[in-house]
Image (cartoon, rainbow, N blue to C red):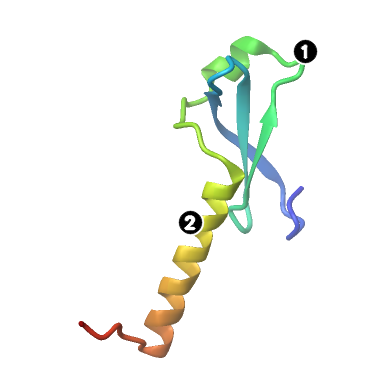
Amino acid sequence: MSDCGCSMEAVGCFQRPNGEYVIIHRCLGCEFERFNRIAADDDFDLVLSLPALPPRTSREMKAQQVEVFLAEQQEQWGWVEEAS
């Protein structure tokens, strides 16, 4: 579960440079993403049947969320950057 309490769904996977596979789970409520390494008892064929997504890190995802938030705030409050 995510912090908002909604269920997480496996939406894809990617392979790290070291060969390790990672499953991407996304919250069905707030769209938070969590990255989980596959476990020895995971069905590897099922993992490979997930859509292949580009590798990414939690830090990159958080930066994207901040950019979206700031853009929404600018739109909401009518902030406009002045040209130099």
Picture coordinates of residue 14 (x, y %)?
Answer: 53, 25
Task: Give the side of residue 76 with respect to residue 62, left or right.
Answer: left
Image side of residue 5 versus residue 34, left or right: right
Label number found at residue 11: none
**Residue at which label 1 appears:** 40
- Name the element at disc 1: loop
The secondary structure type at the circle numbered 2 is: helix
The answer to whether residue 65 is above or below residue 41 is below
Q: Position of residue 74 (x, y in %)?
A: 40, 81
Q: How far is disc 2 from disc 1 in space, using C-alphas?
A: 31 Å
Q: How crowded is mark 2: few (under 14 residues within 10 Å), some or many (20 or more)?
A: few
User: Closer to the camera, 82 or 77?
Assistant: 82
Above or below, 4 against 56 in this view is below
Residue position for label 2: 64
Q: How crowded is the residue under tag 1: few (<14 C-alpha within 10 Å), some, or many (20+)?
A: few
* Residue nearest the observer in this picture, 57 or 10: 57
